[in-house]
Amino acid sequence: MHQIRSCWLCVFVVATLTGSARASEPPDPASLTIEKIFESPDFVGDSVSARWSKEGAGYLTLDSSLAVSGGRDIVLHDAHSGEARVLVSAARLVTSGESAPLAIDDYAFSDDQTLVLIYTNSKRVWRANTRGDYWILDIASHELRKLGGDAAPATLMFAKISPTARHVAYVRENNLYAEDLVTRQITALTTSGNRHIINGAFDWVYEEELGLRDGFAWSPDGTALAYWQIDTTGVPEFTLVNNTNGLYPQLNQFAYPKVGQQNSACRVGSVAVDGGPTRWLDVPGDPREHYIARLSWTPDSRHMLLQQLNRRQNTNRVLLADAGSAQVTPVLTEQDDAWIDVNDEFHWLDQGRRFTWISDRDGWRHVYVARLAGGDVKLATPGNYDVVQLLHVDEQEQALYFQASPDNPTQRYLYRINMDGTSFERLTPADQSGWHQYQISPNGRWAIHQASAADSPPVTELVALQQHTTRRVLADNAKLRKRFGELKIAPAEFFRVEIEPDVRLDAWCLKPPDFDPAKKYPLLVYVYGEPAGQTVVDRWSGRNWLWHLMLSQRGYVVMSFDNRGTPAPRGRVWRKAMFHKLGILGPADQAAALEKVLAARPYLDSQRVGIWGWSGGGSSSLHAIFKYPELYQTAMAIAPVPNRRYYDTIYEERYMGLPGDNPEGYQLGSAINFAHQLQGNLLLVHGTGDDNCHYQGTEALMNELVRLNKPFTMMAYPDRSHSISEGTNTTRHLRELLTRFLTENLPPHDK
């Protein structure tokens, strides 16, 4: 029940009007308010959106055009000299009959750099804007034309230029097409697409839980495409009701397999670029009881490599499929007593004879090198630390570059190691702490480096990678840093709480800027607590962090704890301690940490403790106030899942097993079963159009609380999604609602 992918990034924040200055008084630059955080430009930082050119000697940006008002140019910046050159002028993107250029939502160059594909007029499909219009521009001739023939506006998805630059393939209305850029002929590569059959894209649960949207791939030689086909026939459908968009309700039905229900069937095939029958791969196993989670072509275009998960997701089989015969051969099998994470850090080596593989089979998340012919895999990153992410492979130098933090799980740094496991070194300078992110150039010489910390807004720079020397600053955020420096705040405290022998939880604490240890302060705990997110991170978190700082200015102590099972780089045992214990271990760890800090910090008022969270954090907040009423007096649960049986198959069954495997876990891990223990103040907030964590679950909890005659407060936002962000003034209204509830039920004044 993570929110928008990748997950914990979807934690949202609130603010309060309580204690704001009178209208006649000038605004206090040292104090935070809702308006300053959410509606003013005061704390909006500069960001750098760049991508490396194919060879890695420069990087590309979208810059405001000097020639065409409102347009943007695609600009190439030479990494060494800093020289900027316009590759595609906005003037070249003005279509016939129009005065304004195309608005660029995304773009891609052909491999030979002769064509550029422009994505525009994009529309949201569940999480992302993946449906829109595509235009192709010939850079030499300046010819610009729209793809898709007579297709209706904003109906194409995932368009990609072929490696030969002769074709573009795309999905339209659940079918896969190839368009010849010379003859302009459009060939339907599939015709079976309908409401239940999806070619080249995915259903809701594959997209949400396996991170799959784009469901096809060109062969390296450009002669064929491999694609997924999803069949949702027989999958139970969920219905969202929109009561506010017209005189009568509008219904939106979509396949959504809840725990234990039937999944979609999935298969993979390949088809020639000029059409013809699809050759379906002979993948073993029931297609409804397995997931094909990843697909890639081998460099020679003769084979495909698949990752196949069983339904319990404790086995990942790497299968080599012959594109000609459709036969598959096992290459590698990864198994775990808990669950397996899909491998996304995949790099071909030795002209396709070897590849990188990620595993925590030795207790730590490490990079291995596997052979396509099978056999043992070789450990490349030995040591008692987790590789957070493999960022770059330099095959010529036989070196790996990756993100890790062996000594502090709240931070991130760049490391380098030889593929034979020698010469392990940190490249991020030793005098730089906090959180460091890198986009490394394809040639390994350069990187776009962003550094930040909890109390330090990000700075983005171009560095020469080997020496980590700054060549130029791309965004210093000087205005934001100055404005942040004017605030009256206390620095964040990062610490650990030992809840039992050898079990220490990472935590942070924000105190009022005029903190007096002789006083008593209310405590607000911010929680997520599930495997999709980590909250205790020493990085700039924008509005989330600012809201917590605002609360500290108004007399609250704010803390957060990362319980066992959250994805901190602390080894396999830590990360997979949650297995079969979602909603059980996390809340217990959180309560134990709370007891410890209450005992160790006499300035905390044990009678004024609150907790809040969103999505998985909303569920954790329910568990806290239901299971530990003696510890928590107030809880704010946003978009929770009160009953684990109401959530989707892939997420829940990965961590909890099938219902028959773990009936007690599903019972104890569902907060609704403990609603009878509610004693404190509870606020429930949910969007009725939430396709992820359904409003249905909160309604079931409301019914249970009513049956038990338990008082609570409820706010439903009509037709808002999981982010509760759509519509005019929604964000401010929600933040003020949450803050009023907190102020009224957990007053910040000293007793």
Image: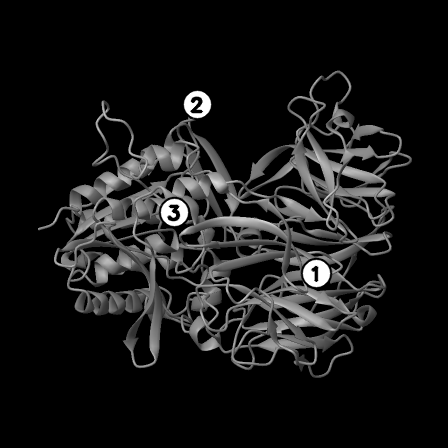
Kindly give the residue lying farthest to the right in the view shown.
Answer: 183
List x then y, in percent, for residue 145.
Answer: 80, 28
Q: Tell me the tag on residue 526.
A: none
Q: Is residue 260 visible?
A: no
Determine contact: label 1, label 2, CB under 8 Å. no
Label 3, secondary structure: give it: helix
**Quadrant in the picture for residue 419:** bottom right
Residue carrying label 3: 544
Say how many tags the image has. 3
Name the residue rendered at 45%, 62% in the picture: 652
The residues tagged by marks 3 and 1 sit, at their Cα atoms, a distance apart of 36 Å
**Residue at the extreme left of the image, as rendered:** 751
The kind of residue tagged 3 is Asn
Residue at 66 percent across and 49 percent down: it is 214
Residue for badge 2: 246
Name the one closer to the observer, 680 or 740. Answer: 740
Amino acid at pointer 2: Gly
Q: Is 638 situated above or below 661?
A: above
Give the mark toward the camera: 3 or 1: 3
Answer with mark 3 or mark 1, whichever residue precedes in sequence.
Answer: 1
Q: Is residue 626 above or below residue 592?
A: above
Reply above or below: 552 against 652: above
Q: Are marks 2 and 3 in contact (CB under 8 Å)?
A: no
Q: Is residue 155 left or right of residue 733?
A: right
Residue 712 visible here? yes
Please tell me which residue is depicted at 71% across the width and 32% down the height of the picture: 73
The crowd level at tag 3 (other Cα within 10 Å; few <14, some 14-19, many 20+) is some
Q: Position of residue 409 (x, y in %)?
A: 45, 68
State the mark number for residue 295.
1
